[in-house]
Image (cartoon, helix red, strand yellow):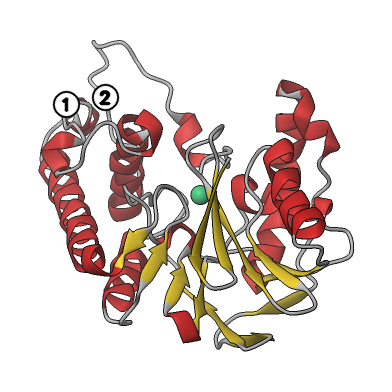
Amino acid sequence: MQRERVAENVFYFQSDLYAQVTAGAVIGPNWAVVIDTLAIPEETLQIRDFIEQELNLPVRYVVNTHYHADHAWGNCFFPGATVIGHTLCRKQLATQGQVSLQEARKQNAAFRRIKIVLPHLTFDESYLILRVGKKTLSMFPLPGPCADNIGILVEEDRVLFAGDAFMPLPYIVDGNIDDMVVSLKKIGKMGLENVVPGHGDIVLRGEIDGAVKENQAYLSALRKAVRKAARRKYPMDILAEIGVEECGKSRVLIGGLAVELHRRNLRALYYQLYGEIPKANPGEDDEDFSDDYDGELIS
Ligand SMILES: [Zn+2]
């Protein structure tokens, strides 16, 4: 796991083991706030050890940017903390999250240590402010990757923990492209020093504008590609040919997962726009892509 200091008393962590997923911590004089919990228990425990052993402070709050496994399943490793999230995050963890955990436990023994802990404190339409020493954490809805995604702004430092509303490759399979566009626009206008994306490297002030535009361009290219495919008899065959690079993004992003995430984006967007699964030529090998629509570990 990588650890980096973003601003005074603000840290960011990035997984070496799973999809470059990130987490954060804001350190106060007497206690700390953790933002997201990473995917693999041993990395979550490294965050806990850093705060509790090295800094010698208890974790009083854990904020979940959204309900996905790699961001919220580590809540159980902070038993003394109050968990904060969107109202929908609580709902999704209680339903989809429990189902996914049962599946994950069958496949990987590491997940047998996990117990889903639902947010104790929730909000939806508006925002929530948490003061940590001299820092003000503003939490607000930032949907797109999923309906429950929130952003956490450290106001004094202009550091935004964006959850999956910001990624090296936008991922909309569990969310909505229009929401994603709105959230990206909002991020671009916030006057930020840093954006901590839900996956990948931190984005610095001078890079934010370009990164927002690049993600917007990718979403436009995605939409164009899906519309083009929809005009054909077998849209799936066309979608299968539209590579991530054709939509302006590199294959190596998110540890090489970009190719697969892009493939799922195309099919999910088709479904979002036309309300049906794209037809494939029955003569070709039929691909099973039911996995595109369920709650897998990513993202
Ligand atoms: Zn994620």
Residue at position x 81%, y 67% in the image: 57
Q: Secondary structure at mark 2?
A: loop
x and y percent of residue 118 in the render?
A: 78, 62
Q: Is residue 153 above or below residue 280?
A: below
Closer to the camera in the image, 283 or 160: 160
- Asked if residue 94 can be seen in this view, the reply is no
In the picture shown, does residue 85 fall above or below 112? below
**Nearer to us: label 2 or label 1:** 1
Q: Residue 116: x, y in percent? A: 80, 51
Residue at (10, 43) in percent of width and height: 228
Task: Work out whether mark 2 precedes mark 1 in sequence or the reverse, and give the earlier one.
Answer: 1
Q: 185 above or below 280?
A: below
Q: Which residue is at the far right?
A: 80
Q: In the picture provided, is 281 more to the left or to the right than 19? A: left
Quadrant of the rendered image containing residue 40: top right
Name the residue nearer the viewer: 202 or 128.
202
Label of residue 46 in the image: none
Hey, what amino acid is under mark 1? Glu
Q: Secondary structure at mark 1?
A: loop
Circle 2: is it few (<14), some (14-19), or many (20+) Cα within 10 Å? some
Inspect the image, locate mark 2, and give the three-letter code of the amino acid beneath it: Ala
The residue carrying mark 2 is 280
Q: Compared to 102, does 97 lie above or below? A: below
**71 lies left or right of 273:** right
Q: CA distance from mark 2 to mark 1?
A: 12 Å
In the picture of the structure, the residue carrying the numbered disc 1 is 241
Residue 286 image position (x, y, % from top left): 35, 16
Q: Quadrant of residue 214?
A: bottom left
Residue placed at 53% from the left, 51% from the top? 22
Q: Position of residue 70 (x, y in %)?
A: 61, 45
Mark 2 in CB contact with mark 1 (< 8 angstroms): no
